[in-house]
Amino acid sequence: MSAGRAPFSPEASETSCDGLFANCWRPAPPAALHLFGDPAEVEALRGSLLAWYDECKRDLPWRVLAVTEPDVNRRAYAVWVSEIMLQQTQVATVIDYYNRWMQKWPTLQALAEASLEEVNELWAGLGYYSRGKRLQEAARKVVSELAGQMPRTAEDLQKLLPGVGRYTAGAIASISYGQATGVVDGNVIRVLCRLRCIGADSSSPPVIDRLWAMANALVDRSRPGDFNQALMELGATVCTPKAPLCGECPVKQHCRARLRVEKELALASRKLLGKLPVVPDVEDCGVGGCPLCPPAAELWDSSLGVTNFPRKAAKKQPRVEQTATCVLERRGRRGALEYLIVQRPSSGLLAGLWEFPSVPLAPGLQQEQQREVLVDHLQAWAGQPVAAGSLRFIGEVVHVFSHIHQTYVVYSLSLDGDVTLDLASSPSRWVTEEEFRASAVSTAMKKVFGESWDFPPLHLLGS
Ligand code: SF4
């Protein structure tokens, strides 16, 4: 809930009041513990963080472009690509993808002209494939509907570009245009929750609203892009999830989680010595039912120290699914082994990517029943009768998507002679191993292929 639009209370509305808005219920303002109330402290924090960033920041290709690229549209595009790639993906993985992407499509116009197949091929292995697709759709929109001009504010970026949310819009606008707007990503959430002892569920709307307000208030007015990157860099390299390096932290003097740990330790040692506690009991905000404090039932865990913050609601378990998949191989015209890959539907999970023929399995099927399901599915592809007994069980490959725990039950089948494919049911093609690796296939399928190679390959067994 945003602080600006509080829920209306019927009781209050029947009470007389002095002004038009006086009888509207408003949430209690956050307690001082959770605020940056002192302007001098905010200035000091900005200064310490930026000085640290200037000295310690990692050299990353998108940071170089953000500083050196004189064309504002190109600069915004370069930041945008990096921000989309970095969502859910580690910096070390992204660097190579980013360099190849910018080499291939250095401008919005170049990306707009690419095919989705090319985009998927380059994105293959980066995960969350819809990101690449949506980036390209948005680039096409900028070229065709906005005359190639990137929207110039965070508000317009979010409003006009598909796939650009509040965070990405803030990052592009602050880093590329110097707009003084904050950003809130996972790293920023962690740092701010620790700096201000915010222990309520960090994915809940009141906490998220408070963090956005805090990020917007804290951002340095003269160097907003650097400040936002510094905050994220701090979360990525110093204020890490499990083992924060508080001793090396440039903003440790402003950190209330650290202060609380110190007080807890002092309290514990006095108790150990049998002395009465002169240190006040744990610092809490003093507001009953505070929406930013940890729930009363969740006790402080002294073994966790500052990592008591932030806290998240228990994660929903990914749903468990099983899929039978078959590495169909044949001897190609030029003698090389070839494998059949088929294209997934254009929407949904792994949209438009290529995979070995696969079929979801109902829970609880025995292996023989699984084979039958797969054989039925394969008849269409193979263009010839497939005997369940000719399928060779290879093993199981587990791949965890964000919300699905997927087990691929992998079989292989070697086909003899010329094979006619039913191209009507879905696009499909035969590829060599090299072509497979260059195709737009998911990481899960690469694992499946690797698994099939860990077994004595069928072709070496004399097909
Ligand atoms: Fe994070 Fe520790 Fe720095 Fe606080 S002092 S912001 S917990 S690294």
Image: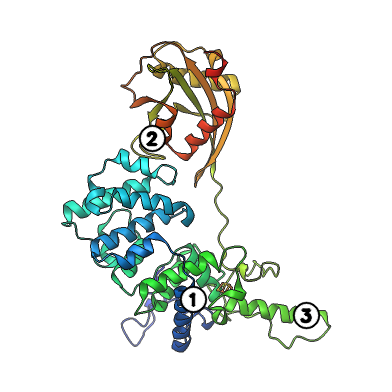
Q: Is mark 1 within 8 Å of ligand 1?
A: no
Q: Earlier in the sequence, mark 1 or mark 3?
A: 1
**Callout 3 touching callout 2 (CB < 8 Å):** no
The residue nearer to you, when weighing 115 against 54, is 54
Label 2: element kind: loop
Q: Indicate the position of residue 386 as horizontal and vertical percent values.
A: 47, 13
In which image quadrant can residue 432 be found? top left
Identity of the residue furthest to the right in this view: 274
Foreground of the two, 98 or 2: 98
Q: Is residue 240 above or below residue 107?
A: below
Image coords of residue 365 (percent x, y): 58, 25
Beta carbon at label 2 within 8 Å of ligand 1: no
Q: Which residue is mark 3?
A: 269
Label at residue 439: 2
Image position, residue 332 (x, y; %): 40, 18
Q: Which residue is mark 1?
A: 52
Res 307 quadrant in image: bottom right
Secondary structure at badge 1 equals helix
Q: SS of the residue at dot 3?
A: helix
Sequence-earlier tag: 3 or 2: 3
**198 or 91: which is nearer to us?**
91
Q: Is residue 159 above or below residue 354?
A: below
Q: Nearer the viewer, residue 70 or 283?
A: 70
Farthest front residue?
334
